[in-house]
Image (cartoon, coloured by chain):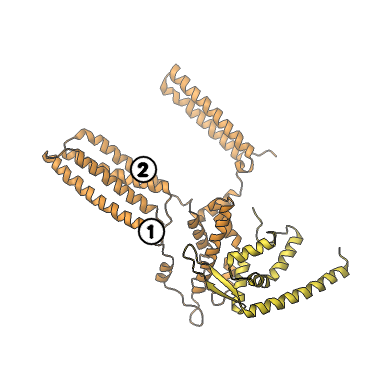
Chain colours: A yellow, B orange
Amino acid sequence: MQKSSGATPDGGADAFAADLLRGHTDTIVLGVLRRRDRYGFEIYKAIRDATGGDYEIKEATLYAAYRRLVKDGLVEAYWGDESQGGRRKYYRITDAGRASYRRNVDAWVATRRTIDSLLDLKGSR
Amino acid sequence: MTNTSVHRLLDDAFAGLPVNPDVQDLKEEIRANLLDRVAELTASGTAPDEASRRAVDELGDVRALVEDMPGATAYGAPGGAGPAVPSVAEVMARHRVPRKPSYVAVVVLASMVLAVSVVGTLVAAVDLAHGSAGPGLPTAAAVVAGAALGWIVGASLAQETTTNHPMPAVRSVLFGTGWGLILAGCLLAYVHFCGARHMWFALDGMALVAGVVLLSYLAATATNRKKQWAVAEARRHAEAGNRFEEDPNAAARFGIYTIVVWAVIAAAFLTVGFAADWRWALLPVLLGFAAHMLILARMLFGTSRS
């Protein structure tokens, strides 16, 4: 009924944008965590709101990203002390994480410039 | 309700995956996030069950996520760095559904009421047989005993346990009523036997039969269709197509047909009953019912015009 998983070709542009986003999941998560510690749903919501709800990153993708980030020491996880309902697992960005974020952002800015100029050179649109 | 549904779906999503601390950790993390997402969906007006289902759907493939985790390949993984396989007792402990303290307290209280009222009935019935007491006390005690047993049965069935889904409220109330009627019927029969009031046996017998019929009905209609896996299965079947859902006009037309058919049936029933004989009055009802079912079948499964 709603958008089914992944491969439905409901517009090549959408799939292209979603792919691009997914490729930067780790950096996006680091960026969301830069201001303050957050738990999974907050991160998910922040990303969803930032994209205007058009391209959502699947939650499973996010959980995989958290694991990767924790393993690489870019993010630390700790359990919150909510007494009601489920306990939330919060993520905090480490110094290594901030460094990695800055490096990736620089790389993205450089790549974006290159791609922009490459696409212009090709003259497609 | 909401919570039960989310937890069930989450359990389903994790069913068959190896149980180890890492996976459990992930599951608890996902659980808290799901609850938030469900709260958000319900706040925007989605029905609780639908909200739970959507939240879990949005989750994506948990299985792939777990299989990517190091050291979580499968059960077994003997020796090495793989996490120890938990014993059955550990799994049970982890999935244990704790009893509500209020439920335990009230059931203990109801059990004491039950014991006292059963004993009270029997003692008072003996007094009644000796003529040293009236029939009011044992009758009241028997009714209280029936109510207490009914309450215990109903409340217990409505509880979720480690191994069982909670029974729907209506069914647990009916189960409680059934057992209550049976106990009250037996006790009252004993009271009336001691008091030599044999004409009352008819009423006691009726209570007893009603209880047995009720329990038989419940046993015959026991079903899995409310459980999450059955609901999911039904949804897959429903996608094959239900005319009334696809075509609201057909549903509206069927509603009008239904009203007309049953109005005609009622008129025919009364006419035949008054004009001829009430024994024949059931015939138009039968014919009308058959016509109604034929219309239903034709509208649901008939060839749809495009």
Residue B111's tag is none
Residue type at mark 1? Lys
Residue A56 seen in this snapshot: no
Q: Quadrant of the C terminus of chain A?
A: bottom right
Residue under label 2, please give it.
B214
Disc 2 element? helix
Name the residue located 52 percent from the left edge and 26 percent from the top edge. B263
Depicted B22 relative to depicted B163: above or below: below
Left-right relation of A66 to B284: right
Q: Residue at x 86, y 65 (%)?
A: A124
The mark closer to the camera, 2 or 1, is: 1
Nearest the eye: A77 or B23: A77
Circle 2 Cα neighbour tier, 10 Å, few/some/many (<14 / 14–19 / ≥20): some
**SS category of the residue bearing label 1:** loop
Dot 1, how many residues are within 10 Å of its Cα: few (below 14), some (14-19), or many (20+)?
A: few
| Residues at marks 2 and 1, CA–CA distance in whole angstroms | 28 Å
Residue A43 percent across, percent down from the top left: 62, 66
Q: Given the image, on which type of amino acid does mark 2 rest?
A: Leu
Instruction: Name the residue located 63 percent from the left edge and 43 percent from the top edge.
Output: B246
Q: Report in which chain the residue with disc 2 lies.
A: B
Q: Position of residue B257 (x, y in %)?
A: 58, 31
Q: Residue at x 67, y 71 (%)?
A: A31
Q: Residue B118: x and y, percent?
A: 22, 48
Name which quarter of the figure residue B165 lies in: bottom left
Residue annotated with mark 1: B100
Describe residue B161's horizontal placement relative to residue B83 as left or right.
left
Which of B200/A36 is in front? A36
